[in-house]
């Protein structure tokens, strides 16, 4: 199982290993030598049918459930600027993709909004046109990699930004979709 990610504002994608998947909402203890933890909100779908080079009008046939989550990116203390994505995205338990997933019909419900807070301060609220972003991501990702049953495809909904830094207090990350709490963890240095 892979976690295929389409970075915000990009037509490309990359894959995270399944060891990055955090299923149980456990606190994230930052590994030694990491200076900052960045984050990006995502919507993700579960791939239900294998495919390659999928056309846009057929994209919805390849996934059967969705949810919202977050991806964490770890930056070493000694790095200047952005560190290679292979390092920063492959640390265990950095893909916060909660189960259970939701039926696709709930995606069209305009009353259910995905909201993320850091230490009780709102830092992200979902937008519309999410269905179109998912459809486009399935097409783009399937041109670069084969989609397999059970893979997750995550689409970043905003650019990654700093969530927590070494030497600061722990940061609480909470996310809700509608009335359901989907993520509730602390990032601890």
Image (spheres, rainbow, N blue to C red):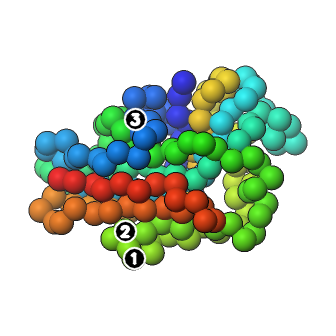
Quarter assignment of residue 12: top right
SS at circle 2? strand
Q: Tell me, yes or no, if residue 75 can be seen here.
A: yes
Q: Tell me, yes or no, if residue 81 can be seen here.
A: no
In the rendered image, which residue does mark 2 sit on? Answer: 118
Residue 10, x across and y down, in percent: 57, 51
Give the mark nearest the N terminus, 3 or 2.
3
Residue 106, x across and y down, in percent: 75, 56
Give above or below for 113 relative to 146.
below
- Where's the N terminus, which quadrant? top right
Q: Nearer the viewer, residue 128 or 68?
A: 68
The label number, if any, that marks residue 20 in the structure image: 3
Q: Residues within 10 Å of mark 3 (few under 14, many from 20)?
A: many
Q: Residues within 10 Å of mark 1 (few under 14, many from 20)?
A: few
Would residue 181 be found to the left or right of residue 148 on screen?
left
Q: Give the CA separation, mark 3 to mark 2.
A: 21 Å
Residue 182, x across and y down, in percent: 52, 54
Q: Give the CA separation, mark 3 to mark 1.
A: 26 Å
Name which residue lies at 22% across and 62% down. Answer: 170
The label number, if any, that marks residue 86 in the structure image: none
Give above or below for 48 relative to 181.
above
In the rendered image, which residue does mark 1 sit on? Answer: 121
Q: Give the CA separation, mark 2 to mark 1.
A: 5 Å
Residue situated furthest right in the rendering: 57
Callouts 2 and 1 close, C-beta under 8 Å = yes
């Amino acid at each position: 199982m892979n976690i295929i990610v389409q970075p915000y504002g990009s037509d490309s994608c990359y894959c995270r290993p399944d060891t990055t998947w955090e299923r149980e909402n456990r606190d994230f203890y930052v590994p030694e030598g990491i200076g900052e933890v960045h984050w990006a909100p995502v919507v993700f779908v579960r791939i239900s049918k294998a495919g390659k080079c999928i056309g846009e009008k057929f994209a919805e046939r390849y996934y059967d459930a969705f949810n919202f989550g977050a991806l964490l990116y770890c930056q070493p203390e000694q790095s200047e600027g952005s560190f290679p994505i292979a390092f920063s995205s492959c640390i265990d338990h950095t893909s916060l993709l909660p189960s259970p997933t939701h039926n696709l019909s709930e995606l069209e419900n305009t009353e259910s909004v995905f909201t993320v807070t850091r230490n009780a301060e709102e830092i992200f609220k979902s937008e519309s046109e999410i269905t179109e972003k998912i459809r486009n991501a399935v097409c783009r990702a399937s041109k670069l990699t084969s989609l397999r049953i059970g893979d997750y495809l995550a689409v970043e909904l905003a650019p990654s930004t700093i969530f927590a830094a070494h030497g600061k207090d722990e940061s609480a990350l909470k996310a809700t979709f509608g009335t359901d709490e989907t993520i509730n963890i602390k990032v601890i240095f």
